[in-house]
Amino acid sequence: MNMVVCVKRVPDTAESEVHIDSSGKGIETGKLSFRMNDADNYAVEEAILIKEKIGGTVNVISIGDEKSDEQIRMALAKGGDEAVRITDPALEGSDGFALAKALAAAVKGMEYDLVLTGALADDDGCAVVGVALAELLGVPHAAYVKKVEVLEDGKRIKVGRELEGGLMEFLEMDLPAVLTIQTGINEPRYASFKGIKAAAKKEIAVKSVADLGLDPSEVGEAGSWAVLESFSYPVVGEKAEILEGDPAETAAKLAAILKEKGLV
Amino acid sequence: MKDIFVLMEHRRGELREVSLELLSGAAGLGGTVVAVLLGSGADDFAAKAAGLADKVLYVDDPMFENYNAEAYQKALSALIKEHGPGLVLMGHTGHGVDLAPALAVELGAPLVTDITGLEMDGDKPKPVRQYYGGKLDAHMVLKDADLYILTVREATFQAAEPSKSGEVVKVANPVSEDISYRKFVEYVEPEVGEVDITQSALLVGVGRGIREDKNLPLLEELASALGADLAASRAVVDAGWLPADRQVGISGKTVKPKLYLAVGISGAFQHVTGMKGSEFIVAINKDPDAPIFGIAQVGIVDDLLKVVPALTEKIKELKG
Ligand SMILES: Cc1cc2nc3c(=O)[nH]c(=O)nc-3n(C[C@H](O)[C@H](O)[C@H](O)COP(=O)(O)OP(=O)(O)OC[C@H]3O[C@@H](n4cnc5c(N)ncnc54)[C@H](O)[C@@H]3O)c2cc1C
Ligand SMILES: Nc1ncnc2c1ncn2[C@@H]1O[C@H](COP(=O)(O)O)[C@@H](O)[C@H]1O
């Protein structure tokens, strides 16, 4: 089974303040740490699990600058075989459609049975790229996949899609196909020391938009469905009453409130 | 203004609430609101949609008993080409996410997903959506086109009382081929665990902020002092720290306890959807900007590893 996995480098914003930068369209990244997109980590693991079970190759693709090599190498260290990084100033401002076009151009040049993306990217949260990519490649897809089983003939798969309330929808589909992988599908491994050392030596093929046979106007803002006009801080309704003091004080205050409400 | 198509979403014999929300929201946008229903023996859904739509386009075919993105895409693109709406709305749900990007690519229609606000500039939508787990709003400008597609977050609009009696127009199924390359097999319900958190009066919601499962006992002690059950964010379930039946949120359970004490939970909308109906919400989080403080009544901004043991002690003291 020849597999392609798409991974994105994203800022870790869950625990940090997010500040809009002076352009109004970006954020200040100076103090943020970056990591592999959560769902992509599961997609990488799923590809490696399939490879370990039935054999095959795992090709890693990322669109980003050279810093994305860190995430690409992590995927290689865990068991990926080859890697491509797509880097081009023309990609600046790309939305999910433009990114999918660049990925499709790269994937078309590879042999593949299965393309895995994450269910959504933690930064933009669009959930667009995987399904758009499938349409551009002209192959079937399934989104929010939380179970993959390769059927005996290796030409079909059975997948479980996770819907609202945790309901699973099972389908059978033909390969090649694109799946968008949901978190929790497996338990992503840690890269071994040996794997990390081997990955450090692997070559990452760097491609420009022109290398992929695309015109710069097909990507970036020009090639996108939508562009970001501006960011704003969300208007929150009434915010929580914040209890002040050290942990002993805030805990005592909270306990008193719970008691007064009859909850203790 | 051109017509607005609203896709009716149904699952296992039920029309989903988001469909009614979208019909209600679309009513304020200016165009003729057309509910598009792909179903099988779904006359009751058609009647329900007609209460909120100016017109219902209804394709009745066994092919549409269960959702199939490929069949839906073929049918919708044919109906769109025939009727020429200017805007298509669908829910940002497991179904919508599986359909909208492919349909948009096929039709060359600009798509914006998971929108949380919408205004129109003539025929052109001006959507707002969130970035960075709800920490920022993004105002999007769409490329000029004849058709736009938007997926809308659930509960963005409120379902109104039925006030219209749109004409139900049955149309022939435009899809004739058998779609064997993607076939629906079955639905499987999530497993039921030992505790039904939808019945719990008091819940302590555990988030990724606990960092390691070795910190879980701190939360268990707090829950036991309170007489509460433990609930969890998806991150905690994905990590295997608590079983899936404890998950609160869009892909977990909807809970409405008297107390929901969110500990180390950021407050992503997928989580909040499942617990915002709780009577009293308290959040403990070290990040003062965590979205959870936008829906909690009371909050503590501090390290949970310090606050939780102190709180457990205080509760024990109070209980004597
Ligand atoms: C289709 C789909 C469905 C989903 N369904 C669900 C769902 O049903 N339920 C759900 O919960 N999520 C769901 N999610 C995931 C959701 O988007 C979030 O990723 C998830 O809710 C995050 O969980 P969390 O708040 O525990 O973790 P994080 O977002 O990582 O937040 C951790 C929080 O802990 C705080 N923290 C860290 N250390 C400390 C400390 N020492 N003391 C105090 N605070 C600390 C941080 O400030 C942060 O706010 C879904 C996502 C998708 C794409
Ligand atoms: N820059 C990128 N490079 C590689 N893959 C990407 C990139 N952006 C998005 N993807 C893939 O598409 C998925 C969904 O992204 P999105 O549609 O932006 O939510 C991610 O989880 C990745 O697998």
Image (cartoon, coloured by chain):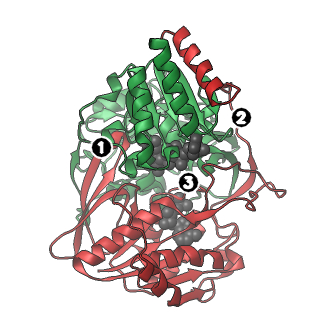
In the rendered structure, which amino acid carries the disc numbered 2?
Val
Please tell me which residue lies in front, A238 or B236: B236
Residue type for callout 3:
Gly
Chain letter behind tag 3? A
Q: Could you classify mark 1 by the number of other residues whose Cα lies within 10 Å: few (under 14), some (14-19), or many (20 or more)?
A: some
> Is ligand 1 within 8 Å of the beta carbon of the residue shown at mark 1?
no
Chain on which label 2 sits = A
Q: CA distance from mark 2 to mark 1?
A: 33 Å
Mark 3 — residue? A125
Q: Nearer the viewer, residue A232 or B56?
A: A232
Q: Could you say which is closer to the camera, residue A111 or residue B89?
A: A111
- In the picture, the quarter occupied by the C terminus of chain B is top left
Q: What residue would you read off at disc 1?
A: A167
The answer for how far apart the CA atoms under marks 3 and 2 are is 19 Å
Secondary structure beneath disc 2? Answer: loop
Of marks 1 and 3, which one's residue comes earlier in the chain? 3
Pointer 2 residue: A235
Query: Eyeballing the image, is A31 above or below B94?
Result: below
Of mark 2 and mark 1, the one earlier in the sequence is 1
Residue B68's label in the rendered image is none
Residue farthest along the left direction in this orientation: A152
Give the spatial CA distance, label 1 vs label 3: 21 Å
Q: Is residue B276 left or right of residue B59?
A: right
Colour assignment, chain B: green
The relative height of residue A6 versus residue B303 in the rendered view (above or below) is below
Chain coloured red here: A
- Please determine whether, in this image, residue B52 is positioned above or below residue A73: above
Is disc 3 in the same subunit as disc 2?
yes
Instruction: Let me know if residue B188 appears in the view.
Output: yes
Q: Residues within 10 Å of mark 2 (few under 14, many from 20)?
A: few
